[in-house]
Image: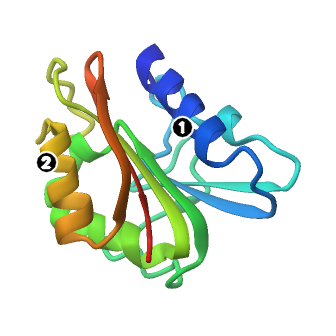
Amino acid sequence: MHKNSMAMMSDIVERHLAGAVNVRILDVGSRDVNGTYKKVFSRPTWEYVGMDIETGRNVDIVADGEWSQIPDGSYGVVVSGQCLEHVKMPWIWSKQLFRVCKPGGICIVIAPWSFKEHRHPVDCWRVLPDGMVSLMSEWTGFETMEVFKKECDTCFVGRKP
């Protein structure tokens, strides 16, 4: 997890979730390759769950291709940072984020728009703000709360209607 991504997530959490209590957070792509967001979500009344496609540090759920072990609407906050670029079919992946997010819940996605190739296990995409809105709002259905880029990353914050 590079420094910019961590700073972006910390800032978003402070601005959008500061007063939240009893929140279940699902971190999609949570395996600790070079750091995680877990400490950003360490609050007494918050439950953080890490999910990835492989076992490893910071992985509580190993997901199958359809995330069948996760019920619809089971998380109030769904986050994913530095994962989208590794997803072969992000249009399917984004629908899963939407499915597992509760109505009224928040989705936060941070992905590079400019970064070197880094295969874990593949490296497929770079996303600019217009692409995030197209994927996460227009295609998937989240209401855009904010979208911006900072340094090498693009961030999307949306709410499930």
Q: Quadrant of the N terminus?
A: top left
When the figure is inspected, residue 23 is found, relative to residue 64, above or below; the finding is above
Secondary element under disc 2, as helix, strand or loop, is helix
Q: Amino acid at mark 2?
A: Gly
Report crowding for label 2: few under 14, some 14 to 19, many 20 or more residues within 10 A (C-alpha). some
When the figure is inspected, residue 4 is found, relative to residue 33, above or below; the finding is above
Q: Amino acid at mark 1?
A: Ile
Q: Quadrant of residue 113?
A: top left
**Residue 161 on image: x %, y %:** 44, 77
Q: Quadrant of residue 58?
A: top right
Residue 57 visible in this rendered orientation of the protein: no
**Residue 8 on image: x %, y %:** 47, 28
Residue placed at 29% from the left, 73% from the top?
Answer: 141
Q: Which mark is residue 145?
A: none
Residue placed at 21% from the left, 54% from the top?
Answer: 133
Residue indicated by mark 1 = 12
Q: CA distance from mark 2 to mark 1?
A: 20 Å
Residue indicated by mark 2 = 131
Residue placed at 11% from the left, 42% from the top?
Answer: 124
**Residue 88 on image: x %, y %:** 14, 54
First in residue order: circle 2 vs circle 1: 1
When the figure is inspected, residue 160 is found, relative to residue 130, above or below; the finding is below
